[in-house]
Amino acid sequence: MAQHWKSETDADGIVWLHFDKAATGTNTLSGEVLTELDELLQEIAAGAPPGLVILSDKKNGFIAGADVKEFTNLSDTEDAHQLIRRGQGVFDRLAALPFPTVALIHGFCLGGGLELALACRYRVADEDPATRLGLPEIRLGIHPGFGGTLRATRLLGAPAAMDLMLTGRTISARAGKKIGLIDHAVPARHLHTAARSLIAKKPAAHQAKGWQALTNHRLARAALARFLKHKVAAKAPPAHYPAPYALIDLWREHADDAAAMLDGEARSVANLITGDTAQNLVRVFFLQESLKSLGKGEDTESSPRFGHVHVIGAGVMGGDIASWCAVKGLHVSLQDRNPQQLARAMQRANGLFKKRLKQPRLVQAAMDRLMPDLAGAGLPRADVVIEAIVENLEAKQGLFRDIEPKMRADAILATNTSSIPLEELGQALQRPERLVGLHFFNPVAKMQLVEIVAGDATNSEEAGRGAAFTRQIGRLPLPVRSAPGFLVNRILMPYLMEAVALVEEGVPAAVIDKAAVDFGMPMGPVLLADTVGLDICLSVAEKLSTHFGGAVPARLRGLVESGDIGRKSGRGFYEYKGRDAQIPKTAKDYRAPTDLTDRLMLRLLNEAVACLREGVVADADRLDAGIIFGTGFAPFRGGPMHYIGHIGAGVLAARLRELADSHGSRFTPDDHWTRLLETL
Ligand code: NAI
């Protein structure tokens, strides 16, 4: 008796195979699920029905992909290869069934789930925007392994298939219909009829035609492969991210030989999945899941509880927090004492809505949800109040005194302060235990992390509600203590200041940035400082140096005094044309200092270790998650603490001591490194 599948035969003899994975809310393909499917397919084949429909009984979607948990146990390439070949075998048997097969899709249909759908003769999908189709394996450092590389390229032609597999992006049912991935995108109520009609009429199965089919031809493949590699290289260097290159090579070598392509696909995925990059990216996936689970409870994204947010301060942050909440379906009132600021924020919001929501109807609905509110009329009704006014203790305290009596007693009261201790802000409140920090990062629409800051007085239930709200707006909550700079700015700042010190020593900014990017950072520290704004960097650096010592580089202060505060002023460390930095060419014979990368990264790692000692976050995994999602720290390295474990705490602490000898006490290893030697 199958645990995860249920098969029903209707009056016409059509078999409806329902996937409803036991003891979980989401369908994923585990070894056990595939074994059951294999047995069922053999039984169904023996009955020779007029057709087979595969569908999901889960509310949230069809199939989310392979069961990623099973990836973490794979260390032997041969074992991995066997496992993948077995999975391929099941899908091959599905593809070879002599009667029509239909995947009936709603919600997410990702990775192995889409590969299963691709092994069916037809695919029909719910046209609702909640339907998401994609092959996101590349994000875990692998590529499709259950025949998806072969079936997608043959079905869609190489450009569309490679685009899906190399970017890992997801598309809607309608977009899927346009590229030929889906046969019919219909309203949910018509799905069953559409499946029946395909089985009755048996139209020829879709496949790439004309020039799309030609892209899989041997002669086209060589040129296209070169082009694709060039495109990928701009984002993912081969040394750090081998999967996209392995995928392109696989297709270039074997696309016209199905058997060789399948075998090559299995070998390639087996190699990738047992390698460091994939194992670390899988780790990052679980870190992300664990942050997501912090906002769990009744207030999840799928069952929203907070309906109305009131944001005070319509500057860079407040304006963007408000518009993001409106994108996510909340009603928002946005208060500022300056009407021009409100007008500017509304204009920026309109830009965001157009970019994110595209359809004019949805853009209009989001605009209707966002109300400029000069007088603060929305305050008494709000479920959540977020303060994002100027970074000034007296101003914020004054505001709190004013708003606390007007707010609902059960509303969340949050501050977006980046540097003022919650204990000081709370002094202005009658109930300081209700104040929680929701520290968003700039730009709000891009940065996934929100630090959930708890002060000494903060009630843990309030912090939990802050995390639940953060999940409701699709962001990742990271609980941190109200220590100066919290976690992310605290760890980032020494690294940025070291970059400025290197500039002062005459190292070209572009060379510094390249060293960090080569390590795996998404952007170099000098460009990052310019992007954040040198005024903001200076103010955070000054605050942190009063707490932790260390000098703020004179060059930074000088630039801010002369008004060159980075990208927003047109000049900082770099010059800007519009939003683009003009990166000067480095002289050919320039030799960078050999300790450049170590100087940058070890300051970051040393500060991470100090934060762990101080308990700024609960543990090393949370720290890694915070730094990956808050700064983009090289995900393929699995996070700063994981990296320390990988290289060896002893090796890195010794290197810090050498740097302290040659460059000064800022490199003195934190005391906690000795503890790490025992634990990592
Ligand atoms: P901003 O200067 O761009 O905006 C502040 C806004 O608050 C202005 O529109 C001002 O008119 C308004 N305002 C001031 N006092 C007010 C009052 N009493 N009532 C109503 N409106 C008032 O500042 P920004 O950069 O948006 O920062 C806001 C907060 O967010 C600060 O606490 C800052 O530390 C924090 N933050 C800033 C980040 C950044 O990258 N800019 C990142 C994360 C947090």
Image (tube, helix red, strand yellow):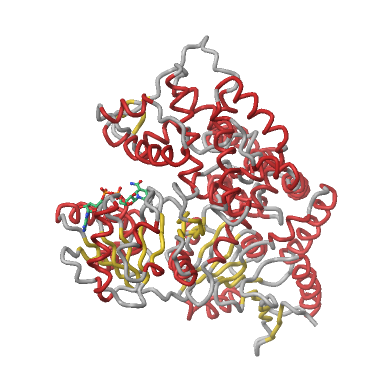
Q: Is residue 107 left or right of residue 400?
A: right
State the residue at coordinates (25%, 26%): 562
Coordinates of residue 255 in the picture (x, y in percent) = 68, 44
Coordinates of residue 482 in the picture (x, y in percent) = 46, 55
Coordinates of residue 426 in the picture (x, y in percent) = 35, 62
Is residue 261 shown to the viewer in this render?
no
Coordinates of residue 132 in the picture (x, y in percent) = 51, 63
Q: Is residue 365 above or below residue 83?
A: below
- Which of the pair 449/487 is nearer the observer? 487
Is residue 494 shown to the viewer in this render?
yes
State the residue at coordinates (30%, 63%): 428
Q: Is residue 639 above or below residue 203?
A: above
Q: Is residue 466 above or below residue 249?
A: below
Task: Give the image quarter of residue 551.
Answer: top left
> Split into 4 quadrants, where in the image is the N terminus?
bottom right
- Spot the residue most to the top: 589
State the residue at coordinates (44%, 47%): 485
Q: Is residue 301 above or below residue 164?
A: below
Task: Give the image quarter of residue 414.
Answer: bottom left
- Which of the pair 7/548 is nearer the observer? 548
State the residue at coordinates (81%, 73%): 39
